[in-house]
Image (spheres, rainbow, N blue to C red):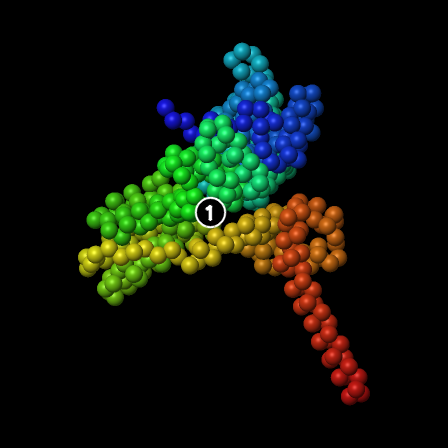
Amino acid sequence: MTYLWVEKYRPKKVSEVVGNQEAIETFVKWMRSWELGKPEKKAAFLYGPAGIGKTSLVLAYAKEYGYDIVEVNASDWRNEEKMKAIVGESSLNATLDGSTKKIILVDEVDGIAGREDAGGIAALRKIITTTRVPIVLVANNPWDQKLAPIRDQALMIEFKRLSKTVVYKRLKEICEKEGVKIPDNVLMKLAEKSEGDLRSAINDLQALAGSRETVTEKDVDILGERNRVKEIFEALRMVFYAKSIRSARVALEGLELDPDTIYTWILDNVPNQVIDPEDLAEVYEILARADVFFTRMNRYQMWKLMKYAVPLMTGSIVAGRKTPPKGFQKFTFPPKIRLLQQYKNEREIRQNIALKMASKLHLSTYKASKEVLPYMAVILSHVDGRGSKLAKFFELTEEEIEYLAKNYGPAMKKEAVVEVEGVKKSVKKTSKRT
């Protein structure tokens, strides 16, 4: 039996968890406070990008110090009744052997913030208040305004992307243990390509090690294409050449891309795949209807609209095209997605800042991003300082403060100088006339 290396080499002790040492120490200190019976906060909220060790840390601590883990995926338990039945009971009861050494791990907490949640967040808040055991919440992005009630109850512990050096060292260790010889430049290329996601880097390493005897940097590039492009190309082929709406919809099964991204792929490839003008107009009309549902779904968090949006999106070609395709046409990579990938990290930082400001000021994320963020940036950059009360109030990290200073500070300052100089010139002209 072939084991996944990501599971085989999952940390079994806290000392084996790589990177984010400050966050690890904070978590361990919080668990020690539970063991002393004096936790300042009954829940800890571990947040940060995927694949950097948040869940692994909790599992390693439990294994090392003899805790039972009750693991729950919050996105599967969104309403109050289920939350109480699964998490609530576990928070009050001992284990089968009578021990209370138990950790409740609630993963993907950001998955319970949708409009359809029937009291899931409120129920979780009550459970945290009454719990007799540590509750650990895990999320990629905790700054949704709906999560504010449980954020206030929890010790917030941020996990940052792992450096490529840390990822490289871990990959090197695994190669040595597996007896696999892969050049250092290839391992470094894998580390760079992972963008700090150790889990994906280990999966890619295993795929490379088992697929060929000699591995080069070119193989890493091909692997990246396989991960991000091959699956979507196969899905597009099924969508554009399907015989029925049902078979077109099957194309999305197992595809690890969000519907908005898939929509962009389909939309950008339609002109090359549907040649007849009348068919093209009909396909665009159906895709436009799907876009209306996606827009409403995202704006109002009405995820139930997905059942209308996805069939319209995937079935648009089958329903709109009357003229059969003439041979196979190559699919193209959408320029929008390529551009977004280049600036992915910056967008994540900006989005996090906007979410924090929106939560604190009780605004929409859009309004916080457009109307508040630029002015807060110039205050932080030129007036308030790094260790300011304002930065602490918004819970901004060093990385976020640096982003604001770099991207907004100079521009805002220049704009202010131009405006002031304009006023001075106007005053001088007026004084000369008088």
Q: Residue at (74%, 79%) from the top-left corner?
A: 425
> x, y (%) of residue 113?
51, 41
**What residue sits right under mark 1 in the picture?**
301
Q: Quadrant of residue 133?
A: top right
Observer able to see residue 138: no
Residue 2 occupies which quadrant of the picture?
top left
For the C terminus, which image quadrant? Answer: bottom right
Q: Is residue 91 above or below residue 171?
A: above
Q: Residue at x 46, y 37 (%)?
A: 182
Front-most of 99 and 52?
A: 52
Please say whether residue 229 is visible from this viewpoint. Answer: yes
Horizontally, residue 272 falls left or right of residue 210, namely left
Against 415, is 18 above or below? above
Q: Residue at x 48, y 32 (%)?
A: 175
x, y percent for residue 223 = 40, 44
Q: Is residue 380 above or below residue 415?
A: above
In-front residue for pair 425/213:
213
